[in-house]
Amino acid sequence: TDSTSLVSYLNKGSRRPNIQNVLFQIYVELLKNNIILVPKWASRNTRAIQQADTGSKLFLKRSDEFGVAQKQYLHMQEK
């Protein structure tokens, strides 16, 4: 991720109860599914981050609107 805040939250948690609650839910799902998550920060200029950003943008009028296109969503559901 290119979010230093997200990396910090995942590594250390948060003092904000609403964020900590979401982090706990993520942790429970990781444990249930035997997944090891290793948060790593990467610059927004990194090719992988640029590809992820491009794939998540809906190309709407506002540059801060993100989502997953229906085709990609359905593909992920098949996995």
Image (cartoon, grey):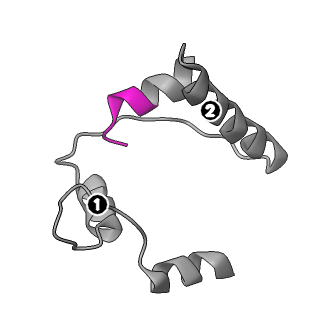
Say above or below: 29 vs 19.
below
Residue 20: image location, x then y, percent: 61, 25
Tell me which amino acid carries mark 2.
Answer: Leu
Mark 2 or 1, which is nearer the eye? 1
Identify the residue shown where x is 57% and y is 83%: 74
Q: Which of 70 and 18 is in front in this view?
A: 18
Estimate the spatial distance between the alpha carbons at disc 2 and disc 1, rounded to whole Å. 23 Å
Span highlighted in magenta in the image: 1-6
Identify the residue shown where x is 66% and y is 29%: 21
Identify the residue shown where x is 30% and y is 40%: 2
Name the residue beneath numbered marker 1.
65
The disc, 2 or 1, on the residue closer to the chain's N-terminal end is 2
Name the residue beneath numbered marker 2.
23
Tell me which amino acid carries mark 1.
Answer: Glu
Residue 5 magenta-drawn?
Answer: yes
Tag 2's secondary structure?
Answer: helix
Residue 22: image location, x then y, percent: 62, 36
Circle 2 residues within 10 Å: few <14, some 14–19, many ≥20 = some
Disc ID at residue 76: none
Q: Quadrant of residue 51?
A: bottom left
Residue 77: image location, x then y, percent: 65, 77
